Image (tube, grey):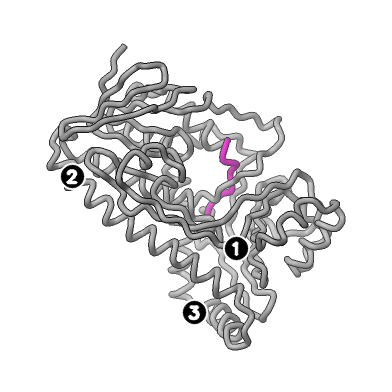
Amino acid sequence: MNNSYDIIINGAGMVGAFTALLLAERGIKVAVMEGRSQTTYSNKADRTLRVSAISQHNLQLLQQLGVMDLMQANRVGYYHNMQVWDNHSNGEIAFQSPSSEPLGAMIENNQTVAALQQKLTEHANATLFFATTLTSYEQSTRKVRVKLDDNEALQAALLVGADGARSRVRTATDISFTTTPYKQHGLVCYVSIENAPERTALQAFNQSGPVGLLPMNEGIFSVVWSLPETQVEQWLGCDTDKFNNALQAHINRHFGEIKLISERAAFPLSKSYASAYHEGRVVLVGDAAHTIHPLAGQGVNLGFGDAELLAEKASQINLRDFDEVSTALRQYQRARTAEAHKTAETMHALHHLFVSQSAPIKMLRAFGMNGLDQVSPIKRWLLQQAGS
């Protein structure tokens, strides 16, 4: 078989598959390795708990790539409005899309992955290796050589680590990865809400952390409830009525009856940074490079931004020229580390701002949220951020 490509990507999750498709569309020959079997999706199956907020900008990219045509439309939760309030002050703010376009959409992760992988399998410039693991690699100034678990070897001008926070690609480099835990977990589940506003993402801030209610269509909302580590087991294991009552109390708005309609799960929350995004002919994207608090649902969009810029840079250079590659990857790293730090530290500051219960901070929150709600230029900027 042909074992030579322009770029090899380890990982065909959301960011890895998105990166591969953007590169393939630009005429770059890509090979993608994924340790699991190809992802499939059916709207007849139960909803999976892991979901992501895809911004308006990235929805447009997915549409242009033909990926949205493969989605099950009744399982895509477009939202045109956002409501955010603080339960320990009178602060609140509301956003509305300035056009007919949505601010974004809530989509189950496995639906996005399935659609991206299907599109890739049909692309002439992409070769996928499912149920295949990268075991090792070596690089020189001329190329990267990758060994697979079936003893096959591939080579390319560039290796992309899109293999998550525990990236095998990153671990094999000298790039360090610093993780700061929040000592919180995100509890996720689905609920039905009797009288929730339509096409609206909701978020309530509490002393213990925020509760996000994210519209999934058909009157169903995905819940992301940030909780201290000491409280997670209590709300994972309690009976349904007690959970519904607790969630209602933490939302503290009159949206009618709230009913738990799924299992519950929880995952630890943290922020992480790679000390560099590239080394030689190896480059990182998505969670392999950074993770952030899910407060504003920007994690996957940050990874998609990595993919978009990397595809742009890779298509503008001679991938065999080490000097051109080095220059392009330095530019990529400079731009994306700045964006990741800005986003992560903003989420970090917001987290600490809203969990503080000191009287001056509560007054500041109320004044800040209510003030922002009245200042059109600032609201417009925040809307742009939400849809970027």
Say if the magenta span includes residue 109.
yes
Q: Quick check: 28 left or right of 68?
A: left
Q: Residue at x 75, y 68 (%)?
A: 253
Q: Which mark is residue 118?
A: none
Name above or below for residue 104 compared with residue 209.
above
Q: Residues under labels 3 and 1: Cα distance?
A: 16 Å
Q: Amino acid at mark 2?
A: Ser
What residue span does the magenta drawing correspond to?
A: 103-110
Q: Residues within 10 Å of mark 3 (few under 14, many from 20)?
A: few
- Give the x, y percent position of residue 60: 44, 45
Residue pointed to by mark 1: 82
Q: Quick check: 145 left or right of 321?
A: right
| Chain-order first, disc 3 or disc 2 | 2
Q: Depth-wise, is mark 2 or mark 1 nearer the camera? A: 2
Residue pointed to by mark 2: 326
Q: Quick check: 317 left or right of 179?
A: left
Residue pointed to by mark 3: 375
Which residue is at the far top? 1
Quarter of the image holding residue 308? top left
- Give the x, y percent position of residue 297: 53, 55
